[in-house]
Image (cartoon, helix red, strand yellow):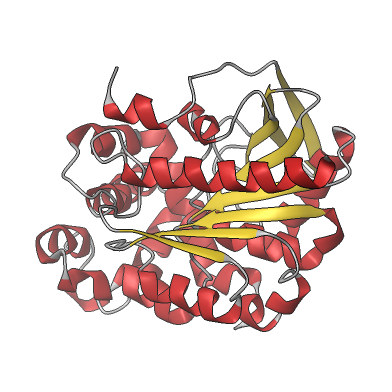
């Protein structure tokens, strides 16, 4: 057994998987795992457009939690694949409410990482009465400075990978890589869309891990998966995640009374720690954990982030069990 397996709960299969129509042509793939009578928890994957992975269930105690995971609009097994129409933050918030209602859940623990932290905050601020608490990591709040960092500023750390990423487009367009890639990812040329998706996702994968991880890069650059996340990611970035600037910080008072754990990799080069620090300062009641040996992704060759996420969830578990006693 690896160190990665040692810090996580055992792998588990869903006890239920189903599809849920949520309006227009969109259907979501939803799975529930763990204790069907346990404390409800929903996990929000990254991207946007990234889809869920089985390992994401393993930071939750399966004997205690009823674990809900789903692929957001256009992502993973949800359909239509890579669809942008009817795909906004407000649509995703409404989807969460549809899933919760469909499952007969009154309140649930809201968890997520990267884009999932942004969606978790937006959902919680829209429906605080439906939240038991939060576990958020790799904090992203869709601020212009964060988006600019990813597309332009990260070359300060990864000039080699960024140069390959930038050279996919003509030199005249490299001052605004978001717009350049968005144009290609939404073009009528299927071959160009696929090539742009793989180029963007390759750069993303190369910058996410604490240690170089060729397996992680290979997994993320599968053409179909890369198309969904690249199209949906740039769609949300072009539109500021469909949120008013600064909303997630200015409305934090709507959820500050709820228990929360914020976990952040010290060397996160995708969603730098300065954003998580902003959230910590605005939400002093939340427990804030810095994971020193971590970048953005929780991977088998650098298990510290996975361990911190499990420990954070265990603490929330204990708080909720104590309240129920």
In depth, the one of 209 and 147 nearer the eye is 209
Q: Percent from the top left, x then y, of residue 221?
A: 31, 38
Q: How many marks?
A: 0
Q: Percent from the top left, x then y, of residue 257?
A: 75, 69
Q: Percent from the top left, x then y, of residue 244?
A: 66, 80
Q: Quadrant of residue 270?
A: bottom left
Q: Quadrant of residue 41?
A: top right
The quadrant of the picture occupied by the C terminus is: top right
In depth, the one of 126 and 303 nearer the eye is 303
| Left or right placement of residue 249 versus residue 269 in this view | right
Examine the rendered structure and indicate whether residue 307 appears above or below residue 119. Answer: above
| Left or right placement of residue 290 versus residue 212 in this view | right
Examine the rendered structure and indicate whether residue 320 appears above or below residue 66. Answer: below
Examine the rendered structure and indicate whether residue 148 appears above or below residue 80. Answer: below
Q: Percent from the top left, x then y, of residue 216?
A: 27, 36
Taking the spot 81% from the left edge, 63% from the top edge, the residue there is 128
Q: Is residue 187 visible?
A: no
The quadrant of the picture occupied by the N terminus is: top left
- Name the residue at the left extreme: 160
Taking the spot 74% from the left edge, 56% from the top edge, the residue there is 93
Q: Is residue 126 visible?
A: yes
């Amino acid at each position: 057994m690896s160190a990665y397996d040692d810090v996580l709960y055992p792998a588990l299969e869903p006890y239920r998987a189903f599809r849920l129509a949520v309006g227009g042509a969109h259907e979501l793939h939803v799975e529930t795992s763990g204790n069907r009578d346990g404390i409800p928890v929903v996990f929000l994957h990254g991207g946007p457009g990234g889809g869920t992975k089985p390992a994401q269930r393993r930071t939750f105690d399966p004997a205690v939690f009823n674990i809900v995971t789903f692929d957001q609009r256009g992502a993973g097994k949800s359909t239509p694949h890579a669809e942008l129409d009817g795909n906004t933050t407000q649509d995703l918030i409404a989807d969460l409410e549809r899933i919760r209602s469909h499952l007969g859940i009154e309140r649930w623990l809201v968890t997520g990482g990267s884009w999932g932290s942004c969606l978790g905050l937006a959902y919680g601020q829209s429906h605080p009465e439906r939240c038991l608490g939060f576990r958020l990591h790799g904090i992203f709040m869709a601020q212009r400075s964060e988006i600019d960092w990813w597309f332009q500023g990260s070359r300060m750390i990864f000039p080699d990978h960024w140069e390959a990423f930038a050279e996919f487009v003509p030199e005249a367009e490299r001052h605004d890589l978001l717009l350049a890639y968005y144009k290609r990812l939404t073009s009528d040329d299927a071959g160009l869309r696929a090539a742009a998706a793989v180029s963007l996702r390759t750069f993303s994968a190369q910058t996410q891990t604490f240690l170089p991880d060729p397996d992680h890069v290979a997994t993320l650059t599968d053409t179909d998966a890369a198309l969904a996340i690249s199209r949906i990611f740039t769609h949300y970035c072009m539109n500021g995640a469909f949120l008013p600037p600064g909303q997630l910080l200015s409305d934090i008072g709507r959820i500050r009374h709820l228990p929360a754990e914020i976990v952040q990799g010290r060397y996160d080069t995708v969603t730098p720690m300065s954003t998580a620090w902003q959230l910590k300062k605005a939400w002093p009641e939340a427990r804030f954990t810095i994971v020193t040996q971590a970048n953005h992704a929780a991977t088998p060759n650098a298990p510290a982030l996975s361990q911190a996420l499990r420990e954070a969830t265990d603490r929330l578990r204990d708080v909720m069990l104590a309240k129920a006693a």
